[in-house]
Amino acid sequence: MDGRNGTMGWPYMPMGTSVYTAAPYGYGMPQPARTGEEVVRVTGLYKRYSKKADWAVTNVNFTCREGEIVGLLGHNGAGKSTTLKCLEGMLPFERGEITIAGYDIRKQAEQAKQQMGFVTDNHATFVKMTGLQYINFMADVYEVSTKLREARLNALEKIFQLGKPIENLISSYSHGMRQKICMMGSLIHHPKLWILDEPMTGLDPRTMKAVSTFMHRYVAAGNSIIFSSHALNTVAKLCDRVVLIRKGEQVDELNVKQIYASNPNFDFEEYFLRNEREE
């Protein structure tokens, strides 16, 4: 049946096939050299929600290069989600510049958005669609061929293991299942930049482990990931660099690998809490 109308049977991957060799999704292809070219640049970002409101984000500056996972770390309400939504183009901002793979998010929004996939903190999808219809809708938006989307969907299923419920309405999904289908939809076009807002929320331990492994392999293939979290252990395990945000202001940027290389016993929790106390 036609995969575009959401009525095709679930395309399971043959037993013994690895998700990372499921070409043409990208994992079976020769991996490009990690040139470290800049994918994201945020310069002097300021955002507020009304002229009379306080600044939600104040003078945030960071970059993300090929092969990097960059985390935005901060308490709830610190400005992490606001920063990501500006980065994705969902929110306008008053000052600053944001470029995605060289495209200005305000002046070249369409080109910039073609380079990214975004998982929102509320796992926004179209709940009156089935999971498969939603994946096909996202593939249509990004002009992914039927053959290519089937191969990619097979690969993604090995990670997220949604199974037969992909044929059910998203409105019937649990919180964790909605998170999974949102992630799958954001990856179907194999974006250069994957943006995630609190990505592990609602996922079971097995899926959390699979997603963590996938994130490392995804950037190893020359892509980039930016995600927000207030989970210190997740940030410490996954990130190459961390941007610390407090009350809308960027207070520090840490190179995780360098820190652990010089001090294997570095305590991220203590560092974070100490910065929270410094008002």
Image (cartoon, rainbow, N blue to C red):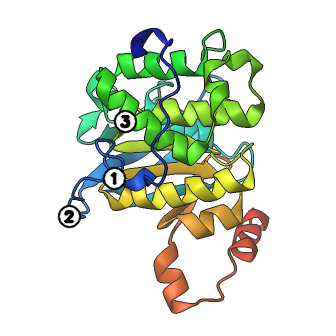
Quarter of image, res 54? top right
- The three-letter amino acid code for the residue at tag 1 is Tyr
Closer mark to the observer between disc 1 and disc 3: 3
Residue placed most toward the observer, 63 or 164: 164
Please give the label number shown on residue 27.
1
**Quadrant position of the C terminus in the picture:** bottom right
Residue 205 shows in the view = yes
Q: Position of residue 138 (x, y in %)?
A: 44, 21
What residue is shown with label 2? 33
Please report the residue visible at 70 percent of the width from the left and 80 percent of the height from the top: 267
Q: Secondary structure at mark 1?
A: loop
Residue placed most toward the observer, 176 or 241: 176
Numbered disc total:
3
Answer few, some or many: residues within 10 Å of disc 1's Cα (few below 14, many 20 plus, some between 14 and 19): some
Q: Earlier in the sequence, mark 1 or mark 3?
A: 1
Closer mark to the observer between disc 2 and disc 3: 3
Q: Is residue 141 left or right of residue 82?
A: left
Please report the residue visible at 37 percent of the width from the left and 35 percent of the height from the top: 151
What residue is shown with label 3? 151
